[in-house]
Amino acid sequence: MQLAVLSGFVLAAFAPLLQRWCAARTSLVLALYPAALALWLLTQLPAVMGGEVLVFSLEWVPSLGMSLTFVLDGLSMLFALLITVIGTFVLIYAGGYLKGHPDLVRFHVVIVAFMVSMLGLVLADGLMTLFVFWELTSITSYLLIGFNHTDLEARKSARQGLFVTVGGGLALMAGLVMLAIAGDSWSLQELLSSGDVLRDHALYLPMLLCLLGGAFTKSAQFPFHFWLPNAMAAPTPVSAYLHSATMVKAGIYLLARLHPGLGGTEAWIGILSVVGALTMFTGAFLALRHTNIKKLLAYSTIMALGTLTMLLGIGTEGALIAFVTFLLAHSLYKGALFMIAGILDHETGTKDVTAMGGLRRLMPVTALVACIAALSLAGVPPLFGFIGKELMFESVLEAGSFRAIIFLLSFSAAIFTIAVAAIVVLRPFFGERRETPKAAHEAPSAMLAGPVGLAILSLLFGLVPVLAGTGLLTAAASAVAGESLSVSLSLWHGINLPLIMSLISLALGYLLFRHWDRVRGNLSRLDPLFAHGPEAGYENLMDGIVRISEWQTRVLQNGYMRNYIMVMVVVLIALVGNSLLLRHAPAFAISFDVQFHEAVVTGLMVAGALFACISRSRLGAVASVGIMGFCIALTFILFSAPDLGITQLLVETLTVILLILVLFRLPRFASLSTPLERVRDLVVAGSMGVLIMLLILTVVASNQFVPVSGYMIENSVPLAHGRNIVNVILVDYRALDTLGEIFVLALAAIGVIAMLKLRAPKPEAKGAGKGQGAKESADG
Amino acid sequence: MVKSGTIILNTAARLLMPLQLLFSVFLLLRGHDEPGGGFIAGLVAAGAFILYLFAFGVTATKEVLRMVDPRDLIGMGLLLGTLSILPAWFVGEPFFTAQWWEIPGIDFKASTPLIFDIGVYLAVLGTLLAVIMTLMEVDKDEP
């Protein structure tokens, strides 16, 4: 199971090769992959419908308790089927839509990778596995929105989508970690079966808010809805697949998945139902402002996502049944409508519904399919969308809290949606024939297969709800509820309030459609208001981030070595000083049991250091620093550490050589600092020296731990076969550190080579040396 | 600039370089038991080349190094260091566990720490030579 799903990544990698072998039929060949998965899922369907939860576990690193576990229950089965079935149609469709596109290969690679990520997301049992797949869908979505990468708008939209969803992803990760802490497990199965543990935990509210942050951004809930219409810059197959049927439902999936463990509390009901209803209304209302068919559909998708969130918030048995039904219905009709929008764009050369008209004679099949899908969107019997809408009204009426607000918002959203459905179909296909940029004719069969297949399912499930109803939806709704429910769907419920609401909304919606042009005109007066919407907030945030990073780069990365060193030293003083002086009282004993030669060496060191500071010539300073170095080497030798002594001597020698080589290329020795700055430097350097002295004295005086050197000395010969402990430490005890050090050394060499050999030629900066030398000489 | 040197420096460099290199290998091999080791030996070897460099210049030193680019030495060193941690894995012990092999006939024990030390030696030598030769080459470019 896991391997079957993950093998899709391999397939994605081989898609370019496939393109070479199969040429124009690549899309069809690739479509075999989701089709095969869908068939396999169908064979598992009876077991899942029987209420079984299939667990596929693959041990990965058993010693660390890491495994890759996939779980197939009603909810993940419903999602997995949607992903694979619609994925099959979309791939076939894309073969026609992007026929001959130079970047078709790239499209194939990314969309198959997305498909696998999405499947992994809905099947994953481990929280981290889920998170990884979640982020993968964000990244692939980014690549697909920006598919036309030469288009500035597309790139901007892609970035916006990425920032919003990945920003939410960060919140999600925090939420998942809290979830794991609260439930003491990383497995969703275990977490959700733990009863009220999560709901009663002290972290419940922060955890919920973080998880909602992730889910709401991904699923374009108000006020994060603005990225979704912009994502329509993607090619239409992508919009049909990612931005209506699957990816944007990932957030909804997560909420549904967590409902048994987290749902039902006051916070959950309040936030989800109100945000959902608000999103619903916003989406449906804003749709009316647009004439671009893809934007119209995108806003109606926002409406649908809001509906789903709201239903999860209401959380009654009826609402959950309505949730799964609406979810299925929406994926079927919205997928079909997007593909039809693509056909219209492809055949007529425009996306503006007001520029099209009377196309039904030219494209009869498309028109018929569009009608079926739009009727389902509008919720007209006998289509599956009608059942979904009836159930939605029913649940709104039985909502426990905020009933009035939810009712008002969802009822008006329903009216707007009906108008949108009418606009999407009646405008292009009926009425007077209008000239379009391209001469329209019926779409190729590859592009029709998808919408026809989905429309037939919409019709079939509506007429014979048993087909969709009893089995899969029961299992899915039960998974969401966390207890077994029974779903029985039917078209006719008798004359009741939901039916009357449906009829009223149909009539009002049609009325709105008739006067759409005037309404749109009136709405455009509100444009200045929309300019201050959440999207403007996003733009300001982004600009602010750029400004702050510019400022902090200017301050921190100013190119002066002296400033870098100063910042580092000051930070070190603050941190070490805090921990040494404030948190631990420095305890040490000073004894002046010094031998004469030791005093001489120390005196030389101090003199060298002082002279280096006051020397008026650079060579003098280098020499006196050298004296210090050699005195340190002497100290090592005096205290019987010959290895260190030798190393210090060699390093000192080489340092002097390096300094001489660099010396010639430095600018003239000049005094750049004011007396005040020199006093400041004195204070900083002095504090550092005093602090390090205190630190060393304290370390020598305190004996909190058994020194590790004892073990090393004892085992050096028997275990490491070496008598030179310093070397044994370097190459055996601490070989990992040494390995890291030689890598650092190599990096430093690469850095020097790169800076000296690859820098841009600067005519006026003659003899400029290493980084700061170049900068300083350029500055003065 | 660094001028190619005097007769004394030239003669000394010519004589001292092989000695210093030999000494560095000696330091490297005895490092496990006596003062020495890869790091010190690498510094000594680099010193040998640098002396030669000062006496005869970059071009002549490159000829002495023949085909070996100091940058390749760095790579070789890192590679050896990394490879030396693997044998432990093949005998089922954690990475980095030292492996010792007796070589029959001579009184010498080959081991992964020794290979590791040679890696350190090459990396240190390569780094220093690369840095100093680059610095001197740039000198030549910009008189």
Image (spheres, rainbow, N blue to C red):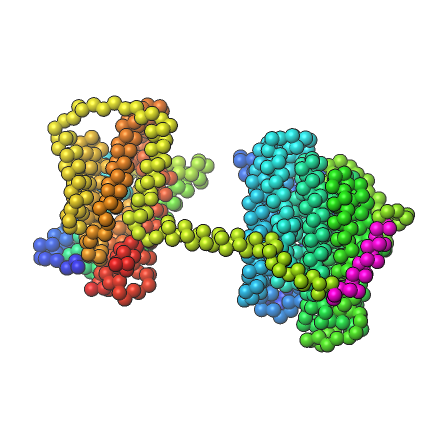
Direction from residue A460 to residue A4 in the image, left or right: left
Q: Position of residue A71 (x, y in %)?
A: 67, 41
Instruction: In this rendered view, identify the residue nearer to me: A380 or A26.
Output: A380
Quarter-wise, where is residue A291 in the image? bottom right
Tell me, yes or no, if residue A762 can be seen here: yes
Direction from residue A554 to residue A230 in the image, left or right: right
Q: Residue placed at 69% from the left, 49% from the top?
A: A278
For the C terminus of chain A, the quadrant is: bottom left
Instruction: In this rendered view, identify the residue nearer to me: A260 or A19.
Output: A260
Q: Is residue A500 magenta?
A: yes
Q: Residue placed at 80% from the left, 47% from the top?
A: A393
Direction from residue A694 to residue A314 in the image, left or right: right
Q: Residue placed at 68% from the left, 65% from the top?
A: A292
The correct choice, above or below, for A459 with respect to A44 in the image is: below
Direction from residue A573 to residue A515 in the image, left or right: right
Quarter-wise, where is residue A710 in the image? top left
Quarter-wise, where is residue A417 in the image? bottom right
Q: Position of residue A380 (x, y in %)?
A: 83, 56
Which secondary structure type mostly characterizes the magenta part of the structure?
helix
Instruction: In this rendered view, identify the residue nearer to me: A774 or A409.
Output: A409
The correct choice, above or below, for A372 with respect to A267 in the image is: below
Tell me, yes or no, if residue A52 can be seen here: no
Q: Residue placed at 15% from the left, 56% from the top?
A: B55
Q: Is residue B68 magenta?
A: no
Question: Magenta residues?
Answer: A499-518
Q: Position of residue A777 (x, y in %)?
A: 26, 58
